[in-house]
Image (cartoon, rainbow, N blue to C red):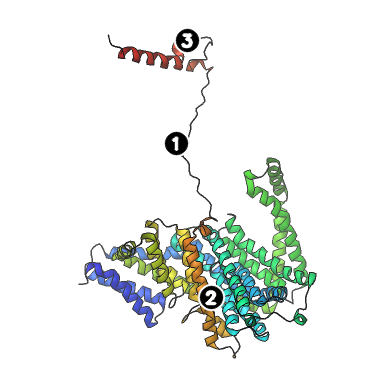
């Protein structure tokens, strides 16, 4: 019989062995869970009965009916569409021309466009593939250092992991039991710092090794002045509209992550239609009409959203306006949207693009659900054999208290990221760490953003850095794999510097969260108005029917005088 205090460690070790063998993670989790459940039941493990396993069907039903997880296929589909719709090409070309005269200008352009794509797509593959196909040949043509070029493209794609609406943040919020909106808000500061670190590194290299990133020749800067700015705006404005549809509506409380993901998926198809060269004049007119209607609805909608913060007269006018025109304007808007979406069905290339996006979304969603079901079974059995107690005792007894816990967890997650992707880490490890973090008084939103910053290294370091695999798959043959791997190392170090900054400056996360109102109970006053002219309550002093005996103040004075008289010595 296995000793009771050893069942948890042995079960965890068995899972590690299964995954090192290379067996699929979802089935490894389920197999280990079922095997140890059978052992625990047959050996009469204390407090582990077969009835515990009856909770598993309810857990599976809970996973399948979790509205929050619907955001994953929506964001995945949105990224798959935007990956090939041509939006990245326009932004990269405009930014490349804008920053071209500066040393490292193309690298700056890749970082900024990577951040914008991250805020639109939420998926690493879309960003890395789009920028690798467009930027890498240009960087090679103008003599950029190969390791620097491949590193900046891969790193800029992984910014997506931390910039809302990241899939990582959705999964972390679900596993930590926190609001996705709060997780997104907390990640804003960390995302800004990461982009600044990347740009700062390029600025440093351009000074130390100027030949590694030469500026573009003047004869190749074909656009200047208003045509250049117009090209940039044509790429940026649709992107920011889509960012507002997804991220803005979540942070303003206008939509849940699932609803925002659905709007983002529809918005991605609309952008793909408008970017396509075969887009008809009818679709362009419909899109302009829909845009005008949206702007007309936006201002009164904003006033109504502000509610008490808006002037009373303006709020009343906005409510009246919306009451009159809301229905017809929404009708016109939906007709315009239907006309644009119909264009997506007419254009053959877009039909194929949507079909490919749906196929990719189906495979990724199925993988996530299977991993989640397997991890739920593993966690149920692991807690049944007191494994969670073993983990909690192990982590809370670390020297250094909270600091020791954070150091251990970040090193542990960083090492795991060499072998597991972020889905596997989130579904296996986070449920074991979250209760300990909560017991130590750690803010779980800050903890989630910190782990998200750490987990993004899983895309960048060997042997399973998916961003490096994506880049290897689309890079020209003359690009060596060794250059891709060596080029990633400085950027992994920058990501670890970000983790250290977040540990020592938690305000970068908490400053963007809504502060809870603290009420001082010692300053609370409850005033109950009393009608002093009411004859039933003694009436007012001097009023007809009132006497000094009815005045509560006089009665209190008489009681005090009587008490003092009793205390006088006779």
Q: Residue furthest left?
A: 1
Q: Which mark is residue 547?
A: 3
**Which residue carries the number 2 mark?**
491
Image coordinates for residue 142, horizontal then vertical, percent: 68, 84
Local crowd size for mark 1, using a 10 Å CA cut-off: few (<14), some (14–19), many (≥20) = few
Q: Residue furthest front?
A: 208
Q: Nearer the viewer, mark 1 or mark 3?
A: 1
Q: Which mark is residue 11?
A: none
Image coordinates for residue 193, horizontal then vertical, percent: 56, 65
Whole-number angstrom distance, CA of label 1 to CA of label 3: 36 Å
In this rendered view, identify the residue nearer to me: 354 or 134: 134
- Pointers 1 and 3 in contact (C-beta within 8 Å): no
Image coordinates for residue 320, horizontal then vertical, percent: 71, 45
Q: Nearer the viewer, mark 2 or mark 3?
A: 2
Local crowd size for mark 2, using a 10 Å CA cut-off: few (<14), some (14–19), many (≥20) = many
**Picture quarter with the N terminus:** bottom left
In the rendered image, the vertical position of residue 473 relative to residue 46, given as above or below: below
Is residue 65 something that shows in the picture? no
Q: Which mark is residue 522?
A: 1
Whole-number angstrom distance, CA of label 1 to CA of label 2: 52 Å
Quarter of the image where one finds residue 135: bottom right
Is residue 354 something that shows in the picture? yes
In this rendered view, identify the residue nearer to me: 522 or 472: 522
Local crowd size for mark 3, using a 10 Å CA cut-off: few (<14), some (14–19), many (≥20) = some
* Element type where label 2 sits in the image: helix
- Pointers 1 and 2 in contact (C-beta within 8 Å): no
Q: Earlier in the sequence, mark 2 or mark 3?
A: 2
Residue at 61% x, 68% y: name it.
120
* Element type where label 3 sits in the image: loop
In this rendered view, identify the residue nearer to me: 531 or 403: 403
Quarter of the image where one finds residue 32: bottom left
């Amino acid at each position: 019989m296995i000793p009771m205090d050893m069942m948890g460690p042995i079960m965890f070790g068995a899972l590690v062995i299964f995954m090192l063998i290379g067996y699929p993670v979802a089935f490894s989790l389920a197999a280990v869970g079922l095997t140890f459940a059978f052992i625990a039941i047959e050996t009469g493990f204390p407090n582990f009965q077969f009835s515990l396993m009856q909770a598993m069907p309810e857990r599976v039903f809970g996973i399948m009916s979790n509205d929050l997880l619907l955001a994953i296929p929506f964001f995945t589909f949105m990224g798959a569409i935007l990956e090939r719709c041509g939006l990245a090409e326009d932004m990269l070309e405009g930014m490349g021309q804008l920053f071209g005269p500066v040393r490292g200008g193309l690298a700056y352009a890749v970082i900024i466009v990577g951040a914008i794509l991250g805020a639109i797509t939420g998926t690493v593959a879309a960003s890395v593939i789009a920028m690798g196909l467009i930027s890498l040949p240009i960087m090679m043509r103008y003599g950029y250092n190969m390791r620097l070029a491949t590193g900046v493209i891969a790193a800029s794609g992984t910014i997506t992991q931390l910039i809302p609406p990241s899939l990582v943040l959705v999964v972390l919020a679900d596993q930590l039991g926190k609001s996705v909106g709060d997780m997104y808000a907390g990640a804003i500061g960390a995302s800004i710092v990461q982009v600044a670190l990347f740009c700062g590194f390029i600025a440093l290299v351009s000074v130390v090794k100027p030949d590694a990133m030469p500026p573009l020749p003047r004869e190749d800067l074909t656009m200047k002045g208003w045509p250049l700015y117009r090209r940039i705006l044509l790429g940026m404005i649709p992107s920011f509209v889509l960012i507002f549809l997804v991220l803005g509506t979540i942070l303003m409380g206008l939509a849940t992550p699932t609803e925002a993901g659905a709007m983002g998926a529809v918005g991605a198809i609309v952008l793909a239609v408008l970017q396509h060269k075969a887009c008809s004049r009818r679709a362009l007119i419909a899109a302009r009409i829909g845009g005008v209607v949206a702007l007309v609805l936006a201002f009164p909608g904003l006033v109504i959203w502000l509610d008490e913060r808006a002037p009373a007269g303006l709020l009343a006018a906005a409510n009246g306006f919306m009451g009159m025109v809301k229905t017809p304007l929404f009708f016109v808007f939906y007709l315009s949207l239907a006309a644009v979406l119909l264009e997506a069905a007419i254009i053959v290339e877009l039909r194929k693009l949507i079909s490919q996006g749906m196929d990719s979304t189906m495979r990724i969603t199925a993988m996530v659900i299977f991993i989640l079901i397997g991890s739920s079974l593993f966690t149920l059995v692991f807690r049944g054999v007191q494994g969670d107690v073993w983990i909690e005792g192990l982590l809370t007894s670390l020297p250094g208290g909270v600091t020791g816990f954070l150091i251990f967890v970040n090193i542990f997650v960083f090492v795991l990221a060499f072998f597991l992707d972020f889905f596997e880490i989130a579904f296996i490890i986070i449920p074991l760490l979250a209760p300990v973090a909560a017991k130590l008084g750690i803010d779980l939103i800050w903890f989630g953003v910190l782990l998200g910053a750490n987990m993004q290294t899983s895309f960048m370091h060997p042997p399973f850095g998916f961003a490096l695999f994506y880049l290897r798959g689309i890079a020209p043959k003359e690009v060596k794999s060794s250059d891709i791997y060596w080029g990633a190392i400085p950027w992994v170090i920058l990501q670890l510097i970000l983790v250290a900054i977040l540990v020592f400056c938690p305000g970068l996360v908490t400053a963007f969260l809504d502060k809870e109102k603290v009420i001082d109970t010692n300053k609370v006053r409850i005033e109950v108005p009393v009608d002093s002219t009411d004859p039933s309550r003694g009436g007012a002093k001097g009023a007809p029917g009132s006497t000094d005996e009815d005045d509560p103040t006089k009665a209190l004075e008489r009681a005090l005088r009587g008490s003092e008289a009793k205390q006088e010595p006779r």
